[in-house]
């Protein structure tokens, strides 16, 4: 059997790359190509690690990109990220060799337009308003003359400079304490809420807290619309004045505060009394008091001069003599009135005595009359009821006589008149 030789020898394969080498080349290519990139998308799967890092995904209609915000970059974000928020992120693409994956490392993050933010703002406003956080009945008055004022703001911003310049220009009778906090970016709302709590717990306690920040876009001011800060403002045990942004900017923290100021400068005006006006008022009041006191002193001096020239002080004995004369005159008049009254009473007494004596039974008896009674004392006024044999007592002027009725004769004067005979006409 013959052997047929065939050529099965293939060309040797090229040198193979290791996984690490491939990953390293991909890493070099991607990271060099996408070292400075802006990516737009919707946030999803957001997770906050205990280390402070934020892990999330950016997605659109057909793709998903993993992303991370390292803890050091979180304060640099313009807005607090949340699921469903449309954002534009800046960063770089990094490859993670142990897993063979890539991700966007974010160092800046902005919301896309204001529509999404305004929608979130409306929803949160409706929720907090329903809970009564914006109720005017909750508002507390500010002290007229604060002695200690806490200012929660960024110590390096223009807002604190405007506030201090205005406040100290109006009133220097208060101690100002600046409680520093970031006023923009991710985590700023939590930091501001913590600063508010710190200001409220200062010892000695403060009379009012000013929460101020300069103007900016809705995104720049978003920390003052975060729920955590709004609730902290509403729950603060010290009156809060919120002066955030410009006049047209209205944040939820403004609505929850006890007083809403238009700007940081306006916040200082609302807290600090007007020292110049107060000095003018005190000066005017002092002048009025001085003038009034001068007039009273002059009036008192005139009265004193008048009294010094009066008879009372010049010759006090004359007053005594005058009073003695007056008393004597009154005494004489009283004596005359009393004597006249006694005379009139005596005359009336004599007249009454005469009338009594004229009607006295004894006087009547003395004139020859007598009074006849029955033995038991009943006076007789008529012969009615008397019978022969009845005992009688007759009272005379000098004694009594007991007698017995012998005969009773009716007085002619008491008898009825006799009838005259009737006349009969004569017949002719």
Image: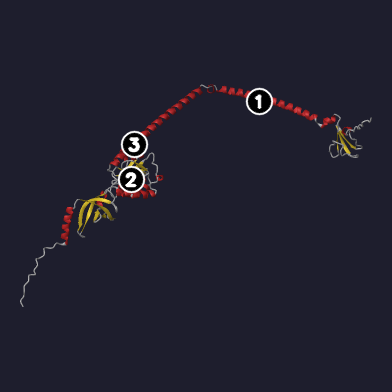
Q: Is residue 8 left or right of residue 393?
A: left
The residue to which callout 3 is attached is: 170
For residue 166, side relative to residue 307 (left or right): left
Residue occupying image coordinates x 70% and y 26%: 341
Q: Residues within 10 Å of mark 1 (few under 14, many from 20)?
A: few
Secondary structure under tag 2 reads loop
Give the structural element (helix, strand or loop) at label 1.
Answer: helix
| Image position of 67 with respect to 255: above or below | below
Residue 188, visible in the rendered structure = no
Q: Which residue is mark 1?
A: 334
Closest to the observer: 306 or 129? 129
What x and y, as percent, mark residue 58? 25, 54
The residue tagged 2 is: 251
Indicate the quadrant where residue 29 lies. bottom left
State which tag comes first along the sequence, 1 or 3.
3
Q: Position of residue 368 (x, y in %)?
A: 86, 30
């Amino acid at each position: 059997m013959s052997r047929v030789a065939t050529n099965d020898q293939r060309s040797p394969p090229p040198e193979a790359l290791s996984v690490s080498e491939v990953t390293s080349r991909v890493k070099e290519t991607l990271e060099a190509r996408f070292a400075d990139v802006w990516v737009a998308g919707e946030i999803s799967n957001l997770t906050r690690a205990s280390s402070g890092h934020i892990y999330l995904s950016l997605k659109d209609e057909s793709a998903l990109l993993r992303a991370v915000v390292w803890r050091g970059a979180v304060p640099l974000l313009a807005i607090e990220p949340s699921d469903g928020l449309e954002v534009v992120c800046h960063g770089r693409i990094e490859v993670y060799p142990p897993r063979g994956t890539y991700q966007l490392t974010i160092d800046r993050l902005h919301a896309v337009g204001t529509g999404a933010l305004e929608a979130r703002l409306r929803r949160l406003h409706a929720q907090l308003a329903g809970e009564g956080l914006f109720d005017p009945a909750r508002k507390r008055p500010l002290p007229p003359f604060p002695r200690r004022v806490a200012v929660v703001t960024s110590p390096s911003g223009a807002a604190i400079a405007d506030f201090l310049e205005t406040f100290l220009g109006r009133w220097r009778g208060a101690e100002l304490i600046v409680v520093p906090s970031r006023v923009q970016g991710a985590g700023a709302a939590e930091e501001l809420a913590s600063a508010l709590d710190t200001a409220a717990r200062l010892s000695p306690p403060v009379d009012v807290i000013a929460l101020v920040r300069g103007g900016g876009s809705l995104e720049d001011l978003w920390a003052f619309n975060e729920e955590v800060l709004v609730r902290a403002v509403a729950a603060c045990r010290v009156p809060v004045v919120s002066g955030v942004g410009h006049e047209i900017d209205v944040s939820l923290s403004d609505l929850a505060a006890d007083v809403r100021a238009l700007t940081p400068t306006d916040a200082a005006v609302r807290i600090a009394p007007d020292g110049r006006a107060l000095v003018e008022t005190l000066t005017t009041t002092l002048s009025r008091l001085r003038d009034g006191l001068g007039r009273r002193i002059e009036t008192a001096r005139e009265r004193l001069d008048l009294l010094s020239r009066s008879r009372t002080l010049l010759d006090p004995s004359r007053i005594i003599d005058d009073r003695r004369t007056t008393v004597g005159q009154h005494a004489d008049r009283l004596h005359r009135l009393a004597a006249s009254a006694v005379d009139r009473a005596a005359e009336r007494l004599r007249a009454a005595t005469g009338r009594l004596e004229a009607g006295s039974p004894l006087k009547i008896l003395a004139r020859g009359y007598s009074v006849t009674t029955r033995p038991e004392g009943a006076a007789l006024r008529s012969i009615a009821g008397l019978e022969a044999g009845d005992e009688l007592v007759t009272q005379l002027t000098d004694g009594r006589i007991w007698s017995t009725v012998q005969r009773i004769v009716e007085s002619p004067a008491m008898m009825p008149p006799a009838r005259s005979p009737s006349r009969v006409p004569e017949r002719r």
